[in-house]
Amino acid sequence: MVGIGHRTIKMALGAGLAIWIASLFGLEFATFSAIIAIICIEDSKKKTLMTIREKFFASLLSLFLGALFLEILGYHPITFALFSLLFFPLLVRLRIQGGFLMSIVVLLHVYALEKASVDVFLNELYLIFIGMGIALLTNSIMPNLQPEINNFKQDIEAHFKVILHEFAAYLRDSKRNWDGTEIVEVETLIEEAKSIAILDVENHLLRKEDKDYYYLEMREDQVELLKQMMQAVALAASSEIPLTQKIMLADFLDYLSENVDATDTTADSFHKLQTCMATIRKSKLPTTREEFEVRANLFYLFFEIENYLKVKRKLFAKWKK
């Protein structure tokens, strides 16, 4: 069924089921229960509950206050319009303005029947309970988003691997042709993955935190550091001076490219980085201005790599807590 998603299917089934149940009970305006079911079905369980809360309390207020308003001032179009003008600011003040349209439809039923009896009130309440109950029932079934999130994570890590490898290759050969498109692509992947991770959290009402979302935030921070590293790599590689320090950092970047997965490899990485830096610090001082500038950029690159690893270490510290 091309072009038909889970939400569309649930809306169709929920609408039909709501009309059927409302008709079995012989309720007036039975089709309204289908409209309630449709407008209460959201992309996630959390959003569905929030929508139901807004619409339920707004409809109750409209039913009782509106009916009282009509009974006192009469069932006239001007009376209905006046109530609508006064009612919306009240909903805004109560922060349930999202239920305005549904609450007005509920009141329109009272207006059409021109009576505010117990039977009319019960009829509307039954319609609301049926529609919202069906929305909750159908939206309790949600697709498993974890495989999709895992695919995004693998794709993101593959991009990181390429980026770090290209940094290393560029330090060895400044004539290497690489346009850095992977950095732009991985930013898009992270944004798409975060939207799905948020949806996954909202589908698990008892889950307060989500490791996948923390992971994606970590990758987002690391992308910003990769951008800074890219500038340092470009400046350091622009010189033709053969320096062993460049090769050492290139080797370390290659090592990082092979360790970008979601496992905690930061302890080994920090140890290797510190060993590499200790060796560089023991090197002879630069003899020319050009060599000094290149080595200064290499030091800057070292600190950015260190920050890159700290971001990952911070993630695992959060997970342990």
Image (cartoon, rainbow, N blue to C red):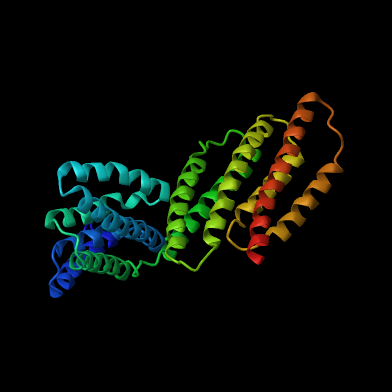
As displayed, is residue 113 above or below residue 23?
Answer: above
Task: Determine the residue positioned at 32% across, 66% down.
Answer: 139
Q: Is residue 167 left or right of residue 307?
A: left
Task: Determine the residue positioned at 19% across, 60% down.
Answer: 116
Residue lying furthest top in this view?
A: 289
Quadrant position of residue 233: top right
Please state the horizontal and vertical placement of residue 2, each as a whole percent of the image: 21, 57
Please state the horizontal and vertical placement of residue 296, each as a whole percent of the image: 76, 33
Please state the horizontal and vertical placement of residue 249, each as a whole percent of the image: 71, 45
Q: Is residue 245 left or right of residue 166?
A: right
As displayed, is residue 281 above or below residue 310?
Answer: above
Residue lying furthest front in this view?
A: 72
Quadrant position of residue 242: top right
Q: Nearer the viewer, residue 211 or 51?
A: 51
Task: Determine the residue positioned at 18% across, 60% down.
Answer: 32
Is residue 3 something one can see in this rendering?
A: no
Q: Nearer the viewer, residue 128 or 135?
A: 128
Is residue 285 something one can see in this rendering?
A: yes
Q: Is residue 294 left or right of residue 177?
A: right
As displayed, is residue 33 above or below residue 158?
Answer: below
Q: Is residue 197 left or right of residue 136?
A: right
Q: Quadrant of the C terminus?
A: bottom right
Q: Nearer the viewer, residue 90 or 245?
A: 90
Please state the horizontal and vertical placement of residue 69, each as a whole percent of the image: 25, 51
Q: Quadrant of the N terminus?
A: bottom left
Q: Nearer the viewer, residue 195 or 38?
A: 38
Residue lying furthest bottom in this view?
A: 24
Q: How many marks?
A: 0
